[in-house]
Amino acid sequence: LLSLWSLVCCSAAANVDEPNLSKSFLPNYEPDEGDAVGSLQDTRIHVFTVDYDYVQIPYEVTLWILLASIAKIGFHLYHRLPRLMPESCILIAIGALVGAIIFASHHKSPPVMTTSIYFLYLLPPIVLEEGYFMPTRPFFENFGSILWWSVLGSLLNSFGIGLSLYGVCQIEAFGLTDLDLLQNLLFGSMISAVDPVAALVVFEEASVNEQLYMMIFGESLLNDGITVVLYNIFIAFTQMHRYEEIESIDVFAGFARFFVVGLGGVLFGIVFGFVSALMTRFTHNVSAIEPLLVFMFSYLSYLSAETLYISGILAMTACAVTMKKYVEENVSQNSYTTIKYFMKMLSSVSETLIFVFMGVSTVGKNHEWNWAFICFTLLFCLIWRTLSVFALFYISNKFRTYPFTFKDQLIISYSGLRGASSFSLAFLLPEKLFPRKKLFITATLVVIYFTVFIQGITIGPLVRYLDVKKTNKKESINEEIHVRLMDHLKAGIEDICGHWSHYQLRDKFKKFDNKYLKKFLIREHKPKSSLLSLYKKMEIKLAIEMAESAMNSSKSSTAS
C-alpha cells in the first residue's frame, strides 16, 4: 500500500519546480542585477526543501520494482493460488488497478512502458535466462521439429491472420476499409508473437513428457526473434508503399532479409560466446569479475546485433548457449552460483514489470473499439493456431521416431498465449504510418487478456484431464553411461552404413570440440576421463538441488 500510494503521489510531486541550489544553500550568493530586491531573502539556508525532479527517474523505477516484487511475494504466500491461475494474471490485475487509481487521480493516461525500455532493458534478461539454462541435449535432439514449427508456424499464423483480417476489412459495414493489405499483414505478424510462460510453468509442475515441453520451450525461445524480423520487414514495406510501388524484387529481398537477419544473429551470438569464453580463461586471479563478463558480453551481443539490424534476440540466445558450454568450465563455483541466481533474479523482475505495465496500459485514452475487428482477430488467432499445429505436425510426424500424439498437438495449440512482445510491438507502431494504431493496441490487449486469463487458467486442468504422457526421467550416473554408450554405438553403425543423422553429426562435433575448441577456450584443458568429469558435474548439481529443496521445504513448513 505504501508503494502504491507513493506511485500515485509521484506525478503530483513532479510538478514542484526545481529549486535553485545556489540560492538555497550558498550563503554568499550575490543576486544578479535583474533580480528583484525582495529576492534577497532566498539566500538564506532552508531547513527543508523538496527537489523531487532530481531523483524522479530512479525513485519511480525503484518504486515500480518494489511494487512488482511485493505483488510477486503476495502471490506465492498463498501456496494454492499458483495452482489455480498463472502469476501473470495477478500481476496484470494489479497493474490495471494501479493504472485506474492514477487515471482517476489525475484524469490523464498513466505512464506506459516505452518500446525502448522493453527491447533494450526488460527483454534481454529474459532471453538470456532462457538461453543459458536451456536443456541443450533435448533441444538439439528436437531441433528439426522446433525449427520447422517455429519458423513455418510463425509464417502461417502471420499471413493467415493478416489475410483473413484483410478479407473482413473489405466489408464496408464494419468501417475498416481504410486498413490495407500491408497493415493487416503487419498486424498479423505482431499478434503472432506468443509468450507461453504460463504453459511452461504448468508443464513443469505436471512433469509432461520431454518432447512436448521442448516444443513449447523452443517456440518461446525462437518465436519472438522470428516475429520481430517479420514485423520490421512489413514496416519497411509500408514505408516504401507510401512513395513507390512494391515490386517482386522487393518481396524477394524481404524474404532474403528474413533469413539473413536470423542466421546473422545466431552467428553473431556464437562469436560473442567464444570471445567471452576466451576472456574467462584468464580470470582465475580475478574471479570476482567473472559474472560481470558473462552479463556484459551477452548484453553486448544483443546491442551489437540490434545496431546492425540483425536479430538481437537470436544473437543473445546463441551467445548464452555457447557461454553455458565453455564459460562454466572456466569460472569458479562461487561465480557459477552468482551467475545463476542473479540471472534468474533479473529475468523474474523483468517479467514481473512487463506484466504490471501491461495492466497499467489497459487504463487510459489510447484505445479505439471496433467489435468486428477485435472479435475476428481473436477468432482468427485461435483458428490459425490450431490449423497450423495440426498441419505442420502431421507432416513432421512422418519423419519422427516418436511422433506427437493428438493430445500433444491439442496442448500445443492451446498453449499459444500472447504476451509482452505483441503488446510492445503494438505500441511501437508509428502513428503517421498507421492512423488506426489505437485500434491495433486495443485488439492486442483483448487477445492478451483472453489468452492469459482464459487459456492460462484452464491449461492446467486441461493437461490433467487429457492425462498427457508424463516423463519419468531421473538423472543418474548409470543412465548417463548408457546414453553415451548408445550415442557412440549408433554413430558407429551409421558410419558403417554410410548413413548420416544427428548421432553422426554429434559425434563429429564432439571430436572437433575436444581437439580444437576446448583447447583454445578452456583454461588448462587436459584430456581426462569423461566418466569422472560427468560424475563431478552431477555431484555438484545434486548438491545444489538438495540445498534448494531444503530451503523450499523449510519455507513451506514455516508458512504452514
Image: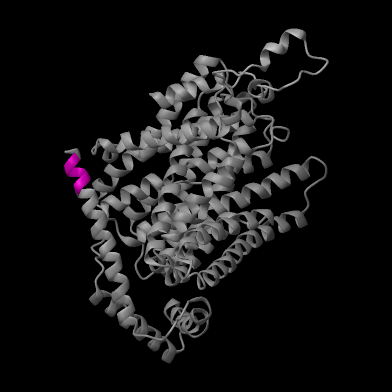
Residue at image position (67%, 33%) is: 179
Q: Is residue 340 left or right of residue 257?
A: left
- As drawn, the residue found furthest toward the front would be 28
Q: Could you tell me which residue is drawn at 41 percent across and 37 percent down?
A: 452
| Residue pictured at 36% horizontal, 57% vertical | 213
Q: Nearer the viewer, residue 322 or 92?
A: 322
Residue 356 falls left or right of residue 552: right
| Residue nearest the viewer, comparing 417 with 475 | 475
Q: Does the magenta-highlighted stretch encompass residue 381?
A: no
Front-lying residue, 410 or 67 = 67
Instruction: List the single residue furthest toward the bottom.
Output: 496
Is 505 displayed left or right of 555 in the figure?
right
Image label count? 0
Q: Main secondary structure of the magenta part?
A: helix
Relative placement, left or right, of 401 versus 229 is left
Point out the residue furthest to the top here: 38
Depicted 357 relative to depicted 332: above or below: above
- The quarter of the rendered structure image containing the C terminus is top left
Displayed quadrant of residue 473: bottom left
Q: Where is residue 429 in the image (x, y as percent from the top left)?
A: 65, 37
Residue 522 spot, x, y in % from top left: 48, 76
Q: In the rendered image of this protein, does residue 163 appear above or below residue 438?
A: below
Display colour scheme: one colour
Q: Residue at x 33, y 61 (%)?
A: 210
- Closest to the observer: 18 or 102? 18
| Image-quadrant location for residue 244 | top right
Q: Give the range drawn in magenta.
A: 554-558
Q: Can residue 84 be seen in this view?
A: yes
The quarter in which the N terminus is drawn is: top left
Is any atom of residue 155 visible in this view?
A: no
Q: Position of residue 38 (x, y in %)?
A: 73, 7
- x, y (%) of residue 336? 40, 62
